[in-house]
Amino acid sequence: MTTTGAGAEVPSAVDGVEPGAESVVVTDHDRGIHGYHQQKDEHLKRLRRIEGQIRGLQRMVDEDVYCIDILTQVSASTKALQSFALQLLEEHLRHCVADAALKGGAEVDAKVEEATKAIGRLLRT
């Protein structure tokens, strides 16, 4: 409390928070920083490698390579994408869901539901 010149007490701002204002948690997610941000270069490198595998598939078809050899390469490309997806999902859980947990409320439920649906889509592939 702060005392005015007239002797009246009024609430004072503490640490830049106005009196009576709710405490607001600002997270990286609020700032537009996603869970994969710190590994962005690594992720882009992996995706370029996968892109190269897909181009290799196109070349194999164009060159009439034996179908089983193409299927082997399809399997390797699929596994690489699945591995990338799992890493991204883990980062989402550690970052976005954890940020929502800090805030509490309905945001947590929404992020968990969103992650659950993403897992369901991954399992269908």
Image (cartoon, grey):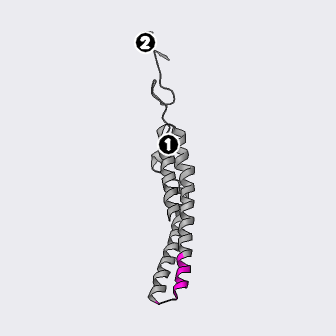
Q: CA distance from mark 2 to mark 1?
A: 49 Å
Where 22 falls versus 44 (above or below)?
above
Q: Which numbered marker is on residue 109? A: 1
Question: Percent from the top left, x then y, of residue 93?
Answer: 55, 51
Magenta region: which residues?
63-74
Residue type of the residue flagged with mark 1 = Asp
Tally the numbered discs.
2
Residue at position x 53%, y 68% in the image? 81
For this rendering, which residue is in front, 4 or 38? 38
The tag earlier along the polypeptide, 2 or 1, is: 2
Farthest residue to the bottom: give it.
Answer: 64
Look at mark 2 in the image and give the residue it sits on.
5
Quarter residue 102 falls in? top right
Crowding near pointer 1: few (<14 within 10 Å), some, many (20+)?
some
Residue type of the residue flagged with mark 2 = Gly
Residue at position x 50%, y 81% in the image? 56
Q: Overall secondary structure of the magenta stretch?
A: helix
Question: Percent from the top left, x then y, of residue 115?
Answer: 51, 52
The residue mark sitting in front, 2 or 1, is 1
Farthest residue to the left: give it.
Answer: 6
Crowding near pointer 2: few (<14 within 10 Å), some, many (20+)?
few
Q: Is residue 99 visible?
A: yes
Question: Percent from the top left, x then y, of residue 80?
Answer: 56, 70
For this rendering, which residue is in front, 37 or 70? 70
Q: Answer yes or no: do the residues labelled 2 and 1 have beta carbons within 8 Å?
A: no
